Amino acid sequence: MKKAFKILGITVGVLVLFLITSNFIQINERENLLYKIQQYVTYNEEDWKNYETNQKYLAEQSPAASTTVVAEPVKDFHPYNIEFLTESAKKEELKKIDNAHFENLIPSKKSPDDQDAQIALIKFTQRRLTDVIINQRLSIKIGKCYENPDKGENYSCVSCMILLYNREKKDWQEAPDGENFLQNSYDFYQAYDGGEWQAKDLSMFIPYDYDLFKKYEKK
């Protein structure tokens, strides 16, 4: 009987010790109190250094301690001639067109002419377009433009298709010979009323300008 009381007393004592110890020993979600007590009893200075190093590494890998930046998919606003697309690509393009609601677009009352667009794109392409204009005998032709409501602090902004017109062949072509650094559409904006037109990347969906290409195709 005394032996049983002794065992019970030891058990209660151990539990009380655990309760008291738990108030003074910090543990994280990957540890338990028994493991922590064992550390304090058996760890030497080198063991503690290794432990701290591991904790720092785990904290860096923890989702709670680090923020993962997920890049948003880049939207392709550029229009395509569906006649040259594969069936699957054509289906995707038609779906994009339906969702874009082109019927809500507002044709611009004021937009750059061919020369304005060419000068703007020469600057935007860091003058790479200059060599194309001179040596490849290509010129910029601009199509129908639409009001772009996302003009920021600028006075006006329009979104338009462009093409490269070969002055020698009297026909348009897809891209300059060599490096293809041009898109088929851009935003053109004025910082103030009457200001010089400048170019930037296209920022809204616009329809493919079939009339523009038909106008400059070789007759």
Image (cartoon, rainbow, N blue to C red):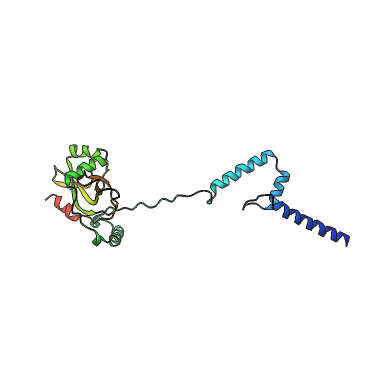
Q: Which quarter of the rendering shows the N terminus?
A: bottom right
**Residue at (72%, 55%) from the top-left corner?**
19
Quarter-of-image position of residue 89: bottom left
Q: Is residue 176 visible?
A: no
**Residue at (17%, 52%) from the top-left corner?**
212
> As rendered, which of 124 and 216 lies closer to the eye?
124
Which residue lies most toward the left here? Answer: 219
Which residue lies most toward the front here? Answer: 193
Q: Is residue 20 visible?
A: yes
Q: Position of residue 49 (x, y in %)?
A: 64, 40
Quarter-of-image position of residue 118: top left
The count of marks equals 0
**Residue at (53%, 51%) from the top-left corner?**
64
Left or right placement of residue 176 versus residue 167 in this view:
right
> As rendered, which of 107 and 144 lies closer to the eye?
107
Which residue lies most toward the right here? Answer: 2
Q: Position of residue 96 (x, y in %)?
A: 30, 59
> As rendered, which of 129 and 199 lies closer to the eye?
199
Quarter-of-image position of residue 81: bottom left
Q: Position of residue 132 (x, y in %)?
A: 21, 39
**Residue at (60%, 45%) from the top-left corner?**
55
Q: Position of residue 158 (x, y in %)?
A: 23, 51
